[in-house]
Amino acid sequence: MTKHTLFSRFSRSAPELFHSGGDQSALPGGSDLRRRLALMEDFENTGLGWFWATDEQGHLTYLSRNAAEQLGAGDADLMGQKLTSLFTLDPDGDLDEVQRPLAFLLSARQSIANLPVRVATQSHEVWWRVSGKPVLNAAGVFQGYRGSANDITALRKTQIDASRLAQYDALTGLSNRHRMTRRLTATLNAYRTAKRSCALMMLDLDRFKQVNDTLGHPAGDELLKQVAQRLETIIGNKGEIGRPGGDEFQIMLPDIDDRGTLGDLGSRVIQMISQPYSIDGSRAIIGTSVGIAIAPYDGLETEELVSAADLALYAAKGGGRGQFRFYSSELKDGANLRRQIEEDLRDALASDTIDLHYQPLVRTANHTASGFEALMRWNHPERGWISPAQFIPVAEDTGIIRELGEWALMRGCRDAAAWPGDLRVAINVSAVQFAADDLPRIVERALKTSGLAPDRLELEITESIFLGDPHATRIMFRDLKAIGVRLALDDFGTGYSSLGYLKNAPFDKIKIDQSFVRGATEEDNNNAAIITAIVSLAEALDMETVAEGVEALDELSLVTNLGASHVQGFVFASALCQAEVLSRLEEGRLTYEPRGPAKHRADRRTLYRKVGIIHEDHRYEGMIRNLSRTGAMIEGILDVPTGTQLVLDMGEGQLAVSTVRRSNGAAQGLEFETPLVNDGAGGLCTRHRISPYALAAAGMPLAALPSGHYPLNSSGAGSAQSGRPKFLQIELSSLSHSPR
Ligand code: C2E
Ligand code: CA
Ligand code: CA
């Protein structure tokens, strides 16, 4: 047997190795020894396991022949080599193993138990599992190691495959939620010590569900793959992309905190995702919204950062399609308000704090009302009046809208039945209600209970109903028209407009959204042309038109001239309670007098935002009168010479270093050292914020930036107040009333 030739090259033989104490002559009986040797040899030959031994320096003194062969080295070459040199570190350390490396265990003379190690000498992956124990002689002196090993390459491969599966999204190959969370946590932990920043982008696809529903699931899968590829093209090695599930994506971007750069990246992502896709010959168009949060500013821990990015994403979606949003603490306040609204909404109906008010829809021809739109009003016991624009979306998300909407139908019909003649009531019906099968029965019940004629009830629905199942939508239209109620298309032009559906949908009226009326009288926009187009389209389809949100007299004459058949707006009246409606009607006052400003005042983007003005080490209170990328007009301190350096504290750690360029009494024109950037919400923000690390260095606890203002100098909070003022502070309340 070659085994013996191998042995003969070693200084000691196998039996000697596998009995502690060293002196084999002390062993009882030569036949027993031979039996043991044969057994061991058999075992080694099966390939199930091998033996190894080292001297006290960790040099190999024995290795089973099969093992040496697997290492591809001549047996003799291995003897005397360091055991550790046979193995290498796992290059992609993918498995969740917390283990102390072999070298450490050996040098600490500790036992080794089932340690997986990667064989260094092979180009392909070979893994062994190694066990061993330190050997002491009779005097207790360390002699070296003896141990065993076996090949676990196959096992390891299945483990790694399983772990890949557990970490990567099988469809796109991107990291899954588990891996993203782990990577983010590891990065944030490491970065906190290194005082580095890390941004997190959260994406949610718009209209993905439609593609899935219309083109089928395989097409939806293909679309997700293409989205992943586009993201990889844009992000490259700037960050790690994950797909936590469904049509959501996450992008972790280490070492980026510049909101200019992040905003640009967010816009590029939106733009790239919104390009058409070709899927099996079909064309699909989707969009995406993006929420962005940055550690350590918006959160230190994974959970905090993820929920900040989530809130930003939510706000981005709420702002319409294809937008990005940065997290700000206002969003958190908004979310808290939402939660409160959600909690209180259920009681609101029962406690009678929600009411319906009615705003007249006035004929342009003779300024008489043809009917009223019912608008919900909520007088919250603690918060006062809450706008339906605020609580209706919450009601829609939570499903309470069905109950609330049913109540509005019952109440609206009942109130309208008390109005004389053929005055109509228009009631808003949410897309959630429209998608529920029982809507026709609820409408019928409301009509029956109130005794209102069906053609005196008008249901206002928005374009968003066309996002639902087209078949169900057709059936709902048919059933509602069969009852005899009228249908109005609300907020026209703001949604997923497609003129195509108008031809086939049985609308009696189109309501032109306020955003087209607003500014239509100014020269540099094409709103008037859009209104003209909508009016002629409606006329061709035999529908009425309502211009919504008309406030000024010039707007009224414009929409009248453009041919709108009806006007709804503050120029005639805002919503009135039922008692007021009734008393007007009893007095026979059916005509409405236009009242309002002669001209719509152009939105000058005038802001009245409180800011801190820091000069040297004193802090003043001021107001921003208007703001642009490059500068601001501020008020609050008197007679500041031009050329003075000031720092504007715009809250949430946003400090803008500026120079006074113009000065006139209490007003100064400032130029920023670094221009502001787009905040994604139509406003502006600073590129950088004061770092929580800097605040922590100044003695404040390390935390994400809360709202409010910040001290500039590093000696701690409030110290800016202590400086001696150079300039005179003007009472802010006197400023807020000053004409401008
Ligand atoms: P909407 O259906 O577009 O209702 C018109 C909104 O414009 C009302 O706001 C109204 O007060 C406001 N408005 C009317 N004239 C003018 C004007 O001249 N200038 C300006 N700036 N605004 C004007 P409101 O009452 O705050 O309602 C907001 C939205 O809440 C409604 O928009 C509607 O979408 C929703 N909503 C209100 N009541 C209900 C309801 O009972 N059910 C459902 N589903 N939604 C409702
Ligand atoms: Ca409406
Ligand atoms: Ca509307």
Image (spheres, helix red, strand yellow):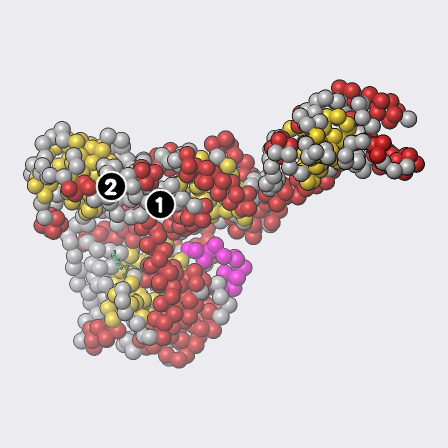
Counting from the top left corner in percent of width and height, residue 332 is at: 35, 52
Name which residue lies at 25% across and 71% down. Answer: 577
Name which residue lies at 35% across and 43% down. Answer: 702
- Residue 291 left/right relative to 11: left
Q: Which residues are magenta?
A: 463-478
Secondary structure under tag 2 reads loop
Looking at this view, name the residue that lies furthest to the right: 31
Name which residue lies at 43% across and 60% down. Answer: 397
Quarter where residue 380 is shown? bottom left
Looking at this view, name the residue that lies furthest to the front: 139
Distance Cα–Cα, label 2 vs label 1: 15 Å
Counting from the top left corner in percent of width and height, residue 638 is at: 8, 39
Please tell me whether the stretch drawn in magenta is mainly helix, strand or loop: helix
**Residue indicated by mark 2:** 716
Name which residue lies at 43% across and 63% down. Answer: 398
Q: Quadrant of the C terminus?
A: top left
The residue carrying pointer 1 sits among few (fewer than 14), some (14 to 19) or many (20 or more) residues within 10 Å by Cα, namely some
> Which of these two is toward me, 437 or 475?
437
**Residue indicated by mark 1:** 703
**Residue type beneath disc 1:** Ala
Q: Is mark 1 within 8 Å of ligand 1?
A: no
**Per the image, is 607 magenta?**
no
Quarter where residue 626 is shown? top left
Mark positioned earlier in the residue sequence (2 or 1): 1
- Residue 594 left/right relative to 378: left
In this rendering, is residue 542 above or below 233?
below
Secondary structure under tag 1 reads loop
In this rendering, is residue 539 above or below 96?
below
Quadrant of picture, ligand 1: bottom left
**Residue type beneath disc 2:** Gly
- Residue 581 left/right relative to 281: left
